[in-house]
Amino acid sequence: MSHPGGAKTSRDSILSKIRASLGATQNDPARLAAAEKRLIAKPRAAPPQRVAAAGTDLVARFKEELQRQLATVVETAGAPEIPAVIAEYLRANNQPLRLRHGNDPYLSSLDFAETPGFKTFQGRAAPDDTTGLSAAFAGIAETGTMALTSGADNPVTLGFLPDTHIIVVPQSRIVATFEDAFARLRQERGHTPMPRTLNLISGPSRTADIGGRIVIGAHGPRRLLAIITGDH
């Protein structure tokens, strides 16, 4: 990936030399198709029975696994309900009615006007932000994990600096396994610049580094709210 303004990085130069030695060109359709074919042809490991069984409710499994890891999960019909859900959650946890999100179109469309005093900001997290709002690329039912791609639409810092992290998960993006999520990422983003980072989040931050005791919020958010929405 080049730096802003078109300047080449050392990585660009190295990859360019490798392509030249192979007689290949960047983003060659035939080579991309061959790589995708190899990935698809490689046999997958058997998925866990809890998500592989016929008739498995992936949304219910996703919700159950997330709650097991101390996350709060709320299901909504769509965007009009989300601001009220967020406001209620923040009040219940004695948090200020304010949050920050990236320029994700769906999150930017949420209307907090009916909640007096609610303030929203856009961009990367600032040191004084108390709540970050993100959109999940995928929800993974087998472990109750949310996959978040990095970028201006969902800055990584929103999931690490604020004490509270809220993630909107489209019901249509809840898949059975990690392999399903990675396949979807390749399908949707494989022919465009891939995200620099893919964060996998399964609950509030925790550690047992000291004395084997679980401490919540040591390296990130103390609270995690997942909002499953049916309209996106």
Image: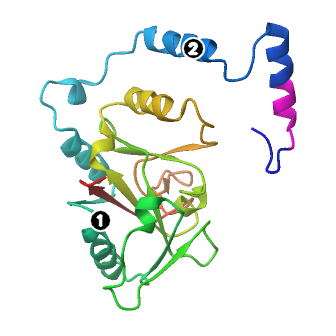
- Location of residue 225 in the rendering, given as x and y in whole percent from the top left corner: 35, 62
Q: Residue 85 lies in magenta, yes or no?
A: no
Camera-side residue: 205 or 36? 36
* Residue at far front of view: 29
At 27% from the left edge and 53% from the top edge, which residue is drawn? Answer: 67
Measuring 53% from the left and 53% from the top, which residue is drawn there? 211
Q: Residues within 10 Å of mark 1 (few under 14, many from 20)?
A: some
Q: Is residue 10 magenta?
A: yes
Q: CA distance from mark 1 to mark 2?
A: 38 Å
Q: Could you tell me which secondary element the residue under label 2 belongs to? A: helix
Q: Is residue 183 visible?
A: yes
Answer with mark 1 or mark 2, whichever residue precedes in sequence: 2
Return the x and y of residue 91 as percentages of the image width and height.
33, 82
User: Which SS class for mark 1?
Assistant: helix
At x 16%, y 32%, the residue is 56
Q: Quadrant of the N terminus?
A: top right
List the residue tagged with mark 1: 79
Q: Is residue 121 above or below residue 77?
A: below
Name the kind of residue labelled 1 in the image: Ala
Residue picked out by circle 2: 35
Q: Quadrant of residue 135?
A: bottom left
- Residues tagged 1 and 2 counted as in contact (Cβ below 8 A): no
- Expressed as whole percent of the image width and height from the top left, the position of residue 78 reads 25, 61
- Please name the predominant secondary structure of the magenta segment in the image: helix
Range shown magenta: 7-14
Quarter holding residue 18: top right
Name the residue type under label 2.
Ala
- Residue under the point 86% across and 19% down: 17
